[in-house]
Amino acid sequence: MAFASAPDALIVVQAWLGATIPLMLMDMLPAARLEPTIRPLPLSALALGGFLAAAGLTMLRYRTRVLVSLIFRLRRAGQKTTSGNSAIRTLIVGAGETGQSLSWQLQNRSGGRAYQVLGFIDDDVDKHGFNVHGIPILGGRHNC
């Protein structure tokens, strides 16, 4: 999976809770029958272990997105400071997957040319005002 999304992170959190809570309950059962101070594993170890496992899985799933975003932002900051006005100002029509891919290609694999993506134009009113990888969606085709 190249890019993980927020629903993917929610699935990881649900799996973490679905595994950790039953383990904690099973850990507490012998303590209720025997002595309250005797437990096979401390509850804090179960909670911390479950949390670290969920955090590790989330980091593995998001590593591509985080690294690409970091490289993208560093290059973009470098272009602003070094290229000045020499970058070709670009406006992309469509903020879907193709528009996002084009934006990334223009800024990262432009063959030596410097492009400055000013924004996206998209007819989907629900997208207006949002940002895609730090680039604003300015409005629709009819607003231009």
Image (cartoon, grey):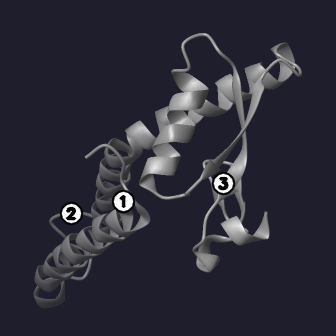
User: On the picture, is 54 further left or further right than 82?
Assistant: left
Q: Residue at x 29, y 74 (%)?
A: 14
Q: Residue at left 66%, top 23%? A: 75
Q: Is residue 45 visible?
A: yes
**Badge 1 amino acid:** Phe
Nearest to the eye among marks 2 and 3: give it. Answer: 3
Q: Is residue 88 left or right of residue 64?
A: right
Foreground of the two, 73 or 99: 99
Rendered image quadrant of residue 6: bottom left
Look at the numbered disc 3 and give the secondary structure of its residue. Answer: strand
Can you say whether 20 is above or below 91 in the image? below
Instruction: Kindly identify which residue carries mark 1.
Output: 51
Asked if the residue at tag 1 contacts the one at tag 2, i.e. Cβ–Cβ closer than 8 Å, the answer is no
Q: CA distance from mark 3 to mark 1?
A: 38 Å
* Between 136 and 55, the one nearer to me in the picture: 136
Mark 2 nearby-residue class (10 Å; few <14, some 14–19, many ≥20): few
Q: Earlier in the sequence, mark 2 or mark 1?
A: 2
Q: CA distance from mark 2 to mark 3?
A: 54 Å
How far apart marks 2 and 1 lie (CA) works out to 15 Å
Residue that badge 3 annotates: 120
Q: Position of residue 95 (x, y in %)?
A: 55, 57
Q: Which mark is residue 41?
A: 2
Identify the image quadrant of residue 111.
top right
Which residue lies at the image location 33% right of the left edge and 63% below the top edge? 8
